[in-house]
Image: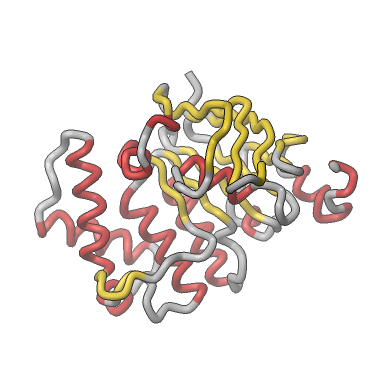
Amino acid sequence: MSFLEIKGLHASVGEKEILKGVDLTVNAGEVHVIMGPNGSGKSTLSNVIAGHPAYHVTSGSIFFKGKDLLAMTPDERANTGVFLAFQTPTELPGVGTALFLKTALNAKKKFLGEKPLDAVQFMKRLKTRAQALGVTDEMLKRAVNVGFSGGEKKRMETFQMAFLEPDFCILDEMDSGLDIDALKTVGDGINVLREPHRSFLMITHFQRLLEYVVPDYIHIMIDGKIVRSGDKTLAEQLEERGYEEFK
């Protein structure tokens, strides 16, 4: 059984059809990368998987760990193990980062029928993940993403992913606007989380992040469809020749 299986997925925003028959299979433990020009449907695909209400699925299916993902609400998808790291992380004034993470994790544990973390367990987990990704105590005391630079927001998204330990991680252009150090932090965060039971879907315009994360498959998306799949050499081909030959 595939970990994530998408078949014939069509989706629209308003009257505009964006996804026009996406087929994608991701097995447990794999890292997949989707590349494509602006407007090709990459971010739409990530939002549809996560359950963004602005996107309407008109046909097709998404199954995750054997369950119908499209029948779930966004919070049910998150609690089942889907995590979306945003291209532009949202600021949450008045919501402390530590409280946000504790609430999210314990909601997931309740959904799964597990015991919530007590204060000692929570702080141990928080400190361990923070140290591994260079997140300071001062950053943890702030409201979620408030007052952070673009690079710090992406670092915190990676930290949230590492803390919550989802089964399927979607990174929507996490590498955009990052300097080399921040890019390496994102790459390190992904590599730390790579496990046989966890998969990644990375969406990007560039192959810069692929210097730190070696993918299993690369897919080219053009006009709402995946038109070519291959290994890392496909990204190198794109860097040299662009998307024209795939259109």
* Color encoding of the figure: secondary structure
Q: Position of residue 74 (x, y in %)?
A: 37, 43
Q: Is 38 on the left-hand or right-hand side of 56?
A: right
Depicted 17 relative to depicted 148: above or below = above
Q: Work out whether residue 14 or residue 199 is closer to the camera in this orientation and state it.
A: 14
Q: Position of residue 149 (x, y in %)?
A: 48, 78
> Residue at 53% of width from left, 57% of height from top?
187
Answer with left or right where residue 143 lies relative to residue 157.
left
| Number of marks in the rendered image | 0
What's the residue at 83%, 48% (across, down)? 237
Where on the picture, by quarter, is residue 227? top right
> Looking at the rendering, which quadrant does residue 34 occupy?
top right
Q: Quadrant of the C terminus?
A: top right
Relative to residue 190, is residue 10 depicted above or below?
above
Residue lying farthest front? 15
The residue at the point 44 percent across, 33 percent down is: 196
Judge left or right: residue 235 versus residue 131.
right
Residue shown at the point (42%, 78%) measured from the top left: 148
**Is residue 159 shown above or below 8?**
below
Can you tell which quarter of the image residue 95 is in?
Answer: bottom left
x and y, in percent, of residue 73 in the image: 35, 39
Residue 192 x/y as whole percent: 43, 51
